[in-house]
Amino acid sequence: MFQPYQLSIALRYLRARSRDSFISFISLVSMLGIGLAVAVLIVVISVMNGFEYELQQKILGMVSDATIIGYEGPLEDWEAVREHALERPDVVAAAPFIEGEGMAVFGDNFAGVGVRGIVPGLESGVTTLADEIVEGDYDSLGSDGYNMLIGRALADELGAKLGDKVVLLLAEARVTPAGIAPRARAFTITGIFDAGMYEYDRGLVFVGMGAAGRLFQTGGKATSVSLRVRDIYAARQVATSVALELGGGFYVTDWSRQFANVFRSIALTKSIMFILLSMVVAVAAFNIVSTLIMVVREKRGDIAILRSFGAAPRAIMSVFATQGTAIGVIGTAFGLGLALVIMRYLDAVVRLIEDWFDIDLLSAEVYFIAELPTQARFGDIAGICSIAFALAVVATFYPALKAARQAPAEALRYE
């Protein structure tokens, strides 16, 4: 009763009546088109956000935020580097390690791996390795024995289990009475970890730093010191400052540099998908144009009567602009609700499809992670809904202007 008559008329045109059922059906199709386009765009962007976040968390869980590496061999005094780094308020923890490469051999199976020698008590401050142990004892690396932690994927590939001995072969040769042979050492598997990221679970093993020093002949020196900082986005600057304060002569790297191509490709793909799917939203929104043109054509008599009673052209425009905007708002709201429901059950749906068709949609060997995460960010959702609403409003201009310019006498002649 108290709403403007333009709004009342616009809402009445949206409701189905027997004579106008086709027009209402077309309006419903326009709403569903906008809703589906908005839902698809929100779900795709949220999945990419979730993938980026999970990948970042898993990477930062198993590697340090920044690393200071000896420029021409092992660090001469890693204790001094670590103590100086810990003096800074923006450094949370620091730990030494020895890094190299080798080949893990168990029976007839073998695999190339990265080898990292750590001090368990210090390593727990910079990585989450201790929390990823699913079998065995993380602290076993603290002894002077030749113990090893391996990933679950690597254990499955080698066919090894807890307590088995795995031989590590190095590319460096040594001279023996029998001739030249690669350096080798047998390690006992005392722990199995599952980081949830195939690259680490398959390609990385951890040993004690003392054992690694003897294996790689570093003379008890660490090759690098890893840092955990308060602001991960300032990790490179912090590590660089520490290296310069120590007089230089170090190589500095951080998580963003090590995995720059991965995160850059995710950002580029997300931008491209946003642009392409926004075009789908635009196509769905401009279906409103055809819908309103049909409504204007159907309601010529109503327009003429309103104009005869003194309705201004602006009022006629507002009637059809309001109708088109209502279609956009309802469609966008429907799409937002549908997207939230899809994201809530998306992983279960993917698993169901994999079981039905016996396929692996998310191979950990390809996508690094084996599940489909989603992360709905308010900024992205607000931007998508705003774009859909703006396109719906723009789509109402031509039909509303056409209705306002219609001559009353010409319309009433055929009524």
Image (cartoon, rainbow, N blue to C red):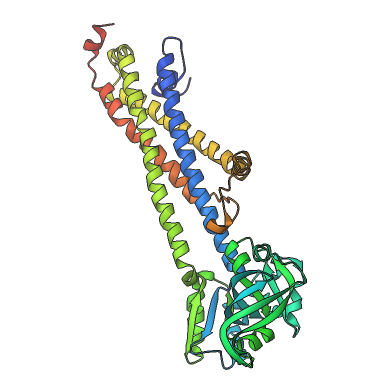
Q: Is residue 303 left or right of residue 53?
A: left
Q: Is residue 345 left or right of residue 160?
A: left
Residue 298 against residue 127 in the figure, above or below? above
Furthest residue to the front? Answer: 178
Which of the two residues, 112 or 39, is positioned nearer the viewer here? 112
Q: Is residue 377 visible?
A: no
Q: Where residue 313 appears, x then y in whole percent?
A: 27, 23
What residue appears at the point 23 percent right and 6 percent down from the top-left corner?
413
What residue appears at the point 60 percent right and 70 percent down from the top-left corner?
111
Q: Is residue 170 left or right of residue 289?
A: right
Residue 31 against residue 199 in the figure, above or below? above
What residue appears at the point 68 percent right and 82 percent down from the top-left corner?
185
What residue appears at the point 52 percent right and 89 percent down from the top-left corner?
73
Which of the two residues, 156 or 144, is positioned nearer the viewer here? 156
Q: Where residue 120 appears, x then y in whole percent?
A: 70, 78
Q: Where residue 107 appears, x then y in whole percent?
A: 69, 70
Q: Is residue 85 visible?
A: yes
